Amino acid sequence: TKTRKNIASGLDSIFHGFSKIDDDFYEELEEILIMGDLGVDTTMNIIEDLQARVKEEHIKEPAECRQLLIDIIKKQMAVDETAYEYENRTSVVLVIGVNGVGKTTTIGKLAAQLKSQNKKVIMAAADTFRAAAIEQLTEWSNRAGVDIIAQQEGSDPAAVIYDACQAAKSRHADILLCDTAGRLHNKKNLMNELSKIRRVIEREFPEAYLETLIVLDGTTGQNALVQAKQFKEVSDISGIVLTKLDGTAKGGIAIAIQSELGIPVKYIGIGEKIEDLQKFDADSFVNALFEKPEEDE
Amino acid sequence: MAFESLTDKLQNVFKNLRSKGRLTEADVKEAMKEVKRALLEADVNFRVVKSFVKTVTDRAIGQDVLTGLNPGQMVIKIVKEEMESLMGSEMTELVIKPGNEITVFLMAGLQGAGKTTTCAKIAGQLKKKGKKPLLVACDVYRPAAIKQLEVNGAKQGVPVFTMGDKQNPVDIAKASIEHARENDNNIVILDTAGRLHVDESMMEELQNIKANVDVTQTVLVVDAMTGQDAVNVAKTFEEKVGIDGVILTKLDGDTRGGAALSIRAVTGKPILYVGMGEKLEDLQQFYPDRMTSRILGMGDVFTLIEKA
Ligand SMILES: Nc1nc2c(ncn2[C@@H]2O[C@H](COP(=O)(O)OP(=O)(O)OP(=O)(O)O)[C@@H](O)[C@H]2O)c(=O)[nH]1
Ligand SMILES: Nc1nc2c(ncn2[C@@H]2O[C@H](COP(=O)(O)OP(=O)(O)OP(=O)(O)O)[C@@H](O)[C@H]2O)c(=O)[nH]1
Ligand SMILES: [Mg+2]
Ligand SMILES: [Mg+2]
């Protein structure tokens, strides 16, 4: 499988040629963070914090300063043990996000992972809107070897979720994975539909642990922050799945989201194959952020 | 998000500065900090922003402030003109061969950008113009990609050519041209699988399609929400495959869409259309001036300035 390459060499090559911590050093840092999609505010906050600590702790070496920065971000992004609690319970995992980010694919990958832990998994095909969304999820259910609950294209997604909750209960499933249609967060009626879906789950399956994952495309820029905010309003979000990190995008917006909204990244997508989903590892994420693009060598 | 508009910010900057007649270096530098910030918040690529800011700064320093404008508006005017020259001010359309000659569009882009949907949207528009489009399913990888194109084609009343998912996309593309010829289709739209620009073998597949089929225009489909990486994507597609234009999707969201400017700046290729929704009629002409206002986060200022 694909992994994020060159981490060590990338780390060594950044801030090369800096013998002291000066304006140029901070400017280079700013460039790296902004090019990683952290956004202006988060970048400035990080740099200010860093400057304060450099002063406080009388740090003189750029290398030391760099390590300090990496440690700060790593610490912030670390996921605690309880993050995957849903795996040990009877739970419903609601997967939401804007169009084309990788929701359906993530469900397929997740189903396979959970199944390999001997969980009984059921999928709910609640994207009844997009052309062939149901067929797509059906194919993933076959690949993962799990059951799927689906109705016709165009049917009420809340009704599919209702059916799926009943099925999960009667078949004693461990985990129900719910796929939903992609929707932009500024579409009021579609966001209301999501609240409705959530209410159905809470009403029909109150004993289940509800895990709501927002899927964000790692290539997305500052808009991902707005997405997370708006989705959080209609459905408490418990974690982020950051996809498409097998490309050259860094997904740094997740750092802004973590610091502003406190939503942790729990999984990353690193490809289109069934095994290309990993639990989030703050170390390799932050290291990859500081990888230098090749053109700069 | 309630952010102060760039105009307000610029007016504030200039409130504290005395200069009236002529823009001083200090004035401009102060103002450009706000411009830089606005562009970065809109996801315009850092390097593009840097060079843009330099150009505007160089031009603005020492300029006479026109009567009727204050220094803030003067800077905005220069920003606007430079944005226009970057973004292009004219509208560009897809090139279509005359008469019954077959025009072939190759649609490419990253995963989930909106290619399949956009193919169907274009097919519908061209059909309305009296053309006879054929949609071709060259995505043999994504689960149900073919079915998705078939469903969308049926909605548009446009035929879909498929050979299942066991054939090579290059062979499918070749065969589709024959099929178009036999069935009087004069537009062929190739829907390809989403691919990463760093995926060598998948990029080669596009090269092979172009080597075997007489592609009229290659269109890069880009999600308008793309961040800093948009330049890498566009540059690589241009270098490896060659693109003729860009379609920006999901602009019905609230993203500022700085990717548009970045891509324009690094490839020089025009933006042809914008996707404004999931429905198959939601494809619109691209208006560079609207995009400029959107990226800068200011709606009506420009019209204000034009009147001055
Ligand atoms: N390279 C890469 N591609 C991915 C990844 N995850 C998903 N994809 C691809 O992204 C595209 C969109 O994925 P989907 O799972 O259909 O996304 P979605 O969010 O369900 O899309 P809608 O239902 O249309 O909103 C597909 O081509 C997937 O194969 C990933 O981690 N890496
Ligand atoms: N809101 C909105 N959604 C869009 C637009 N264009 C496409 N979409 C949605 O984006 C998602 C992905 O669209 P697709 O057409 O499947 O994208 P693709 O590039 O073919 O995806 P892959 O084949 O997996 O690479 C779907 O949910 C579409 O409905 C648009 O302009 N606005
Ligand atoms: Mg989906
Ligand atoms: Mg497609």
Image (cartoon, helix red, strand yellow):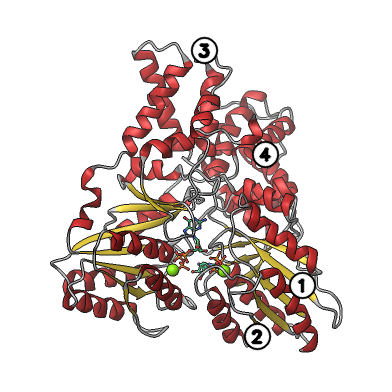
Which mark identifies residue B104? 1
x then y, percent, for residue A105: 43, 64
Who's the residue at 49% across and 33% down the image? Answer: A290
Q: Residue type at mark 3?
A: Lys
Question: Same chain, marks 3 and 2?
Answer: no
* Residue situated in front as seen by the camera: B224 or A179: A179
- Classify mark 3 as within 8 Å of ligand 1 or not, answering yes or no: no
Question: Same chain, marks 4 and 3?
Answer: no
Question: Same chain, marks 2 and 1?
Answer: yes
Q: Is residue A53 above or below residue B168?
A: above
Helix, strand or loop at mark 3: loop
x then y, percent, for residue B174: 75, 74
The answer to whether mark 4 and mark 3 are in CB contact below 8 A is no
Helix, strand or loop at mark 4: helix
Residue receiving disc 2: B158
Q: In this view, does B308 lie above or below B120?
A: above
Q: Residue type at mark 2?
A: Val
Q: Can I make out residue B71 in this image?
A: no
State which chain disc 3 sits on.
A
Question: Same chain, marks 1 and 3?
Answer: no
* Disc nearer the start of the sequence (1/4): 4
Who's the residue at 55% across and 36% down the image? Answer: B34
Residue receiving disc 3: A20
State which chain disc 2 sits on.
B
Who's the residue at 73% across and 79% down the image? Answer: B176
x then y, percent, for residue A20: 52, 12
Helix, strand or loop at mark 1: strand
